[in-house]
Amino acid sequence: MALSEQYLEDDIHPIDIVEHLAEHHDWDFDRIADDQIAMTVEGQWRTYSITLAWSSYDETLRLICTFEMEPPTERLGNLYEGLNSVNDQCWTGAFTYWAEEKLMVYRYGLVLSGGQVAAPDQIDTLINAAVTNAERYYPAFQLMVYSDQTPRQALQVAIAEAYGRA
């Protein structure tokens, strides 16, 4: 049975759907507020912290997937150059580095204007895409900041998409 078949109503809150998906996948989660949920998803390289928040003001479901990263200050230029190249390759979402928090961040906003409702399969795909992209580029980010490789050289390890479970 598809995840979407469990929902017959049209006006189910997106965070309720995310909570159901977290239970379905057996992910640790915390319903922070009615409009926000945080969870952890185990990947091959890292455990990723994922937060989804619903903004009724602009009808957007925002996803933030983070993992810790503490690059040496002298390598930040490489990281920022590499982020531009990585984001050129990402069809959905984008990476950024939050230096103060020492976090690598993948962000995506699903706009559901006009009263649209996100299907459970759509939200599941959104979460899986975040983890897949983080897994795919994690080794490249490591090489960019902890080796002598250029960002272009480091990105060679991310040519093929990562496969696994999220």
Image (cartoon, rainbow, N blue to C red):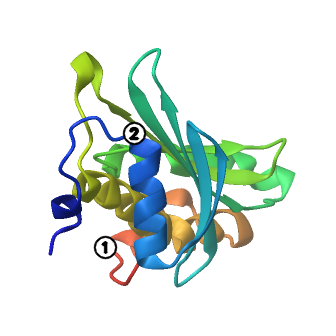
**Vertical side of 2 occupied by 59: above or below:** above
Q: Nearer the viewer, residue 160 or 146?
A: 160
Q: Residue at x 50, y 79 (%)?
A: 26
Image quadrant in which the C terminus is located: bottom left
Q: Nearer the viewer, mark 1 or mark 2?
A: 2
**Vertical side of 2 occupied by 66: above or below:** above
**Vertical side of 144 occupied by 24: above or below:** below
Residue 3 visible, this angle = yes
Q: Earlier in the sequence, mark 1 or mark 2?
A: 2
- For residue 19, which numbered disc appears in the image? none
* Element on which disc 2 rests: loop
Q: Is residue 59 left or right of residue 1?
A: right
Q: Nearer the viewer, residue 102 or 151?
A: 102
Q: Examine the image and state in which quarter residue 130 appears.
A: bottom left
Q: Residue at x 47, y 45 (%)?
A: 15
**Vertical side of 126 occupied by 108: above or below:** above
User: Which residue does the numbered mark 1 point to in the structure image?
Assistant: 161
Q: Residue at x 59, y 50 (%)?
A: 37
- For residue 13, which numbered disc appears in the image? 2
Q: Amino acid at mark 2?
A: His
Q: Position of residue 129 (x, y in %)?
A: 35, 60
Q: Nearer the viewer, residue 125 or 27?
A: 27
Label 2 crowd (10 A; few <14 / some 14-19 / many >=20): few
Residue 85 visible, this angle = no
Q: Amino acid at mark 1?
A: Glu
